[in-house]
Amino acid sequence: MHALAAVLLLVSSSLTLVCSVGLAVMRDPLQRLHFLSPPTAISAPLLAVVVFLDGQGVQAGLKVSLVALLLVLMNAVGSHATARAVRVHQRGHWEPTIDDHVAIVREDEPSRRSERDTS
């Protein structure tokens, strides 16, 4: 195994381990979502690079790269769907209510934030 491949494998597995511990420690489900993204977005592509560097063949490298690409692309979709499911579980619906205080800013209106910051 190449030294660079070993280092990348160590970084990838360490990142996954740290995120697993963070996932177990966090109490809020929405906080846990933040620990799901790095293994998917960083560790999977690093593993694809390791397969290429280790000389397992072009076919194996392409398969692992395809899987890593799909994981990276589906990461945002999975996180969004999970966050929406958490909101539905907590509130019974996903739409914001009047009590949520969601600021709606239109492009043709000046930002209220800039007005508050200057005064």
Image (cartoon, rainbow, N blue to C red):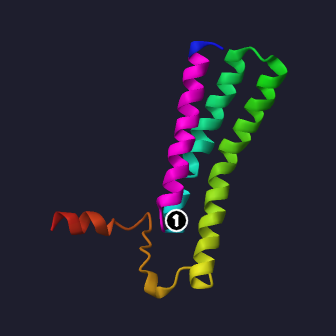
Asked where in the image residue 73 lies, by quadrant, the reply is top right
Q: 79 or 105: which is nearer to us?
A: 79
- Asked if residue 106 is among those painted magenta in the image, a careful observer would answer no
User: Can residue 34 be seen here?
Assistant: no
Indicate the quadrant containing the C terminus: top left, top right, bottom left or bottom right.
bottom left
Q: How many marks?
A: 1
* Other residues around mark 1 within 10 Å, as few (<14) / some (14–19) / many (≥20): some
Image coordinates of residue 57 in percent, x first then y, are 81, 16
Q: Residue at x 57, y 14 (%)?
A: 3
Q: Residue at x 57, y 42 (%)?
A: 16
Residue 93, compared with residue 25, is above or below; it is below
Tag 1, which secondary structure? Answer: helix
Image coordinates of residue 17 in percent, x first then y, are 55, 43
Q: Which residues are magenta?
A: 4-27
Instruction: Work out which residue is located at the far left of the displayed protein and give it.
Output: 119
Left or right? Give the position of 51 relative to 109. Answer: right
Q: What's the magenta bit mostly, secondary-structure-wise?
A: helix
Task: Give the labeled residue for mark 1.
Answer: 30
Q: 28 or 59: which is nearer to us?
A: 28
Image coordinates of residue 48 in percent, x first then y, are 69, 28
- Asked if residue 15 is among those painted magenta in the image, a careful observer would answer yes
Image coordinates of residue 14 in percent, x first then y, are 53, 36
Indicate the quadrant containing the N terminus: top left, top right, bottom left or bottom right.
top right
